[in-house]
Amino acid sequence: MNETEKHHYWQGAFVDDEEAGRRLADLPAAVEAALATVLETETVLAACDALAGALREPAHPVHARLAAHLPAGQDPAVLAELGALLGRRELTRKLRRELGGAAPGRLNRADPRETVYEAWAPVGLVAHIAPGNAATVAPLSIVEGLLAGNVNVLKTSSADTLLTQHLMAELAALDPSGALAARIVVLRFPSSRQEWLRLMCAPADAVAVWGGEGAVEGVAAHVPGGCRLVEWGHRISFAYLTGDAWSDASVLEALADDVCLHEQQACSSPQVVYLDTEDEGEVFAFAERFAAVLGGRPAAVSTASDGEPDPAEAAELTTAELMARLEEHLGLTRVFAAADGSWRVMADTRSPLTASPLHRSVWVKPLPRKRLITTLRPMRRYLQTAGLAGSRTDIAELSRTVLAAGVTRVTPVGAMLESYAGEPHDGVYALQRYSRRVAVQADPARFATTACLDDLALPVVLPPPAGPLLGKEDVQEQGRQLTRADAELYFRSGGSTGAPALSVFSYDDYDTQMHAAARGLLAAGYDPVGDRTANLFYCGGMYGSFISFFSVLERLGGVQLPLSAGPDHRATAQALIDHGADTLFGMPSYLWQLLHAEADSLRAYGGLRKVFYGGEHFTEEQQRTLKTDFGIEAVRSITYGSTDLGPLGYQCTESSGGVHHLHADLHTMEILDLAEDRPVAPGETGRLVFTTHARRGQDLGRYVIGDLGRELPGRCACGRQAPRFELRGRTGDVMRVATYFLNHRRFLDLAEQQGGHRGELQIRLDGAQARERLTVRVERAAATDPQRLREVFLAGYPELRSAVTERLLDLVVEAVDGASLDRSPTSGKLLAVVDARG
């Protein structure tokens, strides 16, 4: 190896031996500097997913660059296999299985009813000692370390190519923040270079070793006290067949598949076939039958990883076969082998586990199930996979037995080498071995509304949004193209601004969003211990609000009365009183109707304390009415969101009106000009555009949701770092009438602030022969004088006054019953603007 060549990748740069040696001496300082920065799990997932896409596409420039570094004779298809393992779906599933969620590093409440915060924290520095001639093991080991948030230094063999170094360089290049590069070091040097090995391991918090006992022992000498030694050593696997199974020709074919795939080079390849018998004759007969099946298989295809045996392996093959043939004279064994030595089946009457010399070399032994544990348990440190074949009852019973004997993995025969995303390896979860479970206990009085401790400490930094703007139809088209695995839960929107739209979720994404909404509800002042909640959202017709907040309360462990919004206000009010409800969840228009329809009984009850609303807004005057007339202490938004994107923002106890914090761990937000696709100036109102991260199967980037808002400067008094924004209505609330643009929100503000209106307000637009008509319909129960309101609108809205003065528009204000206002049939939302002009 030429020491002046740059064989090493160090935190974003390729360096030579001299530079690598110098940096190794300062490794502790480099680790401390890297750990001082935050690595968001989403950063790892986004970069890995982008790399996965490139690896799966042979024409991609990244694929071509990396293919040049594959070992001689290695099939380039290995890059596609690696890409399949690095996709967002697979890695997110791995995170969920091993660490319980897609963002395991955030200090969230372990139990929503307690102010105890737990998270998975990185151990710090993980040193990886990779095996030779295993192209995918080294990069996947680093990715596991990154998912756990660690700094990673990896040693490859001096005989390896620079595939891992260049693969990690491509991964780091996909992260503009530089956080990934800061956590990756890949060195190539021989194991004889003990000083470098010592410098790698000395500051490590965990050392992961891939290899046999000799490799582990060689590294263990350099592992400091208190450092985790994670052994991914060689293991032995076997097949176990009951009497019914070994007489089945299809079982023998499946067994041959397991033997021939990768030429037994995988730890999960069967080296021994056990038969549930004590009859030596059955063992010899089966071995002969299986030899015929094995002999009918095509010859092995030579590859860099599992091709022809090297001289030492060839010698071992010859020795094992000759020893078995010698014992034939004692009646202990019988050997069936290919003339060219390409395979061999060695029947042995003795049960103890014997390692195979591999390369299609299989032992066949008797082992009645009653002796399974006694025979196998002495080898428990080395056992991995048991491939079972038998009846359903046999499989159930034998699974328990072999697991008790020390096996960590049970599969059907024919599937011994198959795996699934997030599968435990050698009986443990890798990510847990590279992580620490940490906890923070906080004062319940001071942290009652803090769901995630990290919200107070540092802002979430997600990859910046990119790509074209998306509209509702673009998102609908994505939903129509989802695969069955990603389309598990269907919702329809309320249709308050158009035809109801279909939104599709995976259950994992739904769970992530419900947990986020639950954290937001705690921030708004919901108390899962003390509050007794009536869920009064609309239900049915695939509308999601009732179901979603049922799920939120379930995750919070809150007391819930799942009543839903119904037309019988008297029965609903009686249920609130009978069951002691003090907290209401629902749509403002429905809650307003319920409270006023049953005002006498609910005022006499006097037990209502909190209202959390969604889908619409309570005006300031309406909130004041709820507090003064019904004794309600807190009226806050339950969440700000949409059916297709889920929860987008939440209120804290310092927020009111349309002010919300962004769910910054799920989304990034842009505010664009009303007419042009450019950011507005700070504080200006514009179109809200959201990019959703961590949605399986859907790329919901830069979605123009249809709402208007403005960002609020400075940090909120609640202490949270998440950005704040104020909702300013919907783009659909801006009406083109009589050559003027008029805004529903402006009417509402004037009615409330100047006209003293305290109820609902709806605008209807009609066409006429002479001029258009704008009718402001206000709720009669609010006791507002329509003529007085008309004067307020004309005085306070210059554009409206001009349109009326110029005889371009007729303005009518009428008081109506609240029940006659037009509402969405699905959600019950009040339609702010009804355009009937045709």
Image: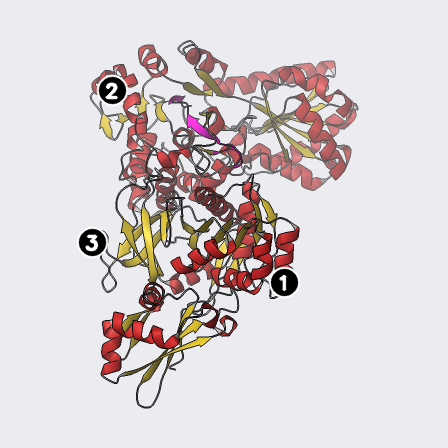
Which element type, helix, strand or loop, lies under badge 2?
helix
Looking at the picture, how far across and down is residue 136, in whole percent? 42, 32
Query: Do the residues bearing badges 3 and 1 touch, measured as CB atoms within 8 Å?
Result: no
Separation of marks 2 and 1 at Cα, in angstroms? 78 Å
Magenta-tinted stretch: 109-130
Q: Which residue is mark 3?
A: 681
Q: Which amino acid, by three-letter code, is at mark 1?
A: Arg
Q: Is residue 578 above or below residue 21?
A: below
Figure check: 678 above or below 298: below
The numbered mark, 2 or 1, whose residue comes first in the sequence reads: 2
Of callouts 3 and 2, which one flags the residue occurring earlier in the amino acid sequence?
2
- Image quadrant in which you'd find residue 540: bottom right
Residue 539 position, x and y percent, is 57, 60
Q: Does dot 1 land on a helix, a strand or a loop? A: helix
For marks 3 and 1 on the same chain, the one whose residue lies earlier in the sequence: 1
The span from disc 3 to disc 2 (Cα, nearest Å) is 47 Å
Give the quarter of the image for residue 708. bottom left
Front residue of this view, candidates 393 and 600: 600
The residue where tag 1 is placed is 570
* Of 291 and 252, the residue lying toward us: 252
How does the figure colour the protein chain or chains?
secondary structure
Residue type at mark 3 is: Ala
Instruction: Determine which of the numbered discs, if any, sits on residue 20 in the image.
Output: 2
Which residue is rendered at x = 42% and y = 72% of the image?
Answer: 778
Residue 542 numbered tag: none
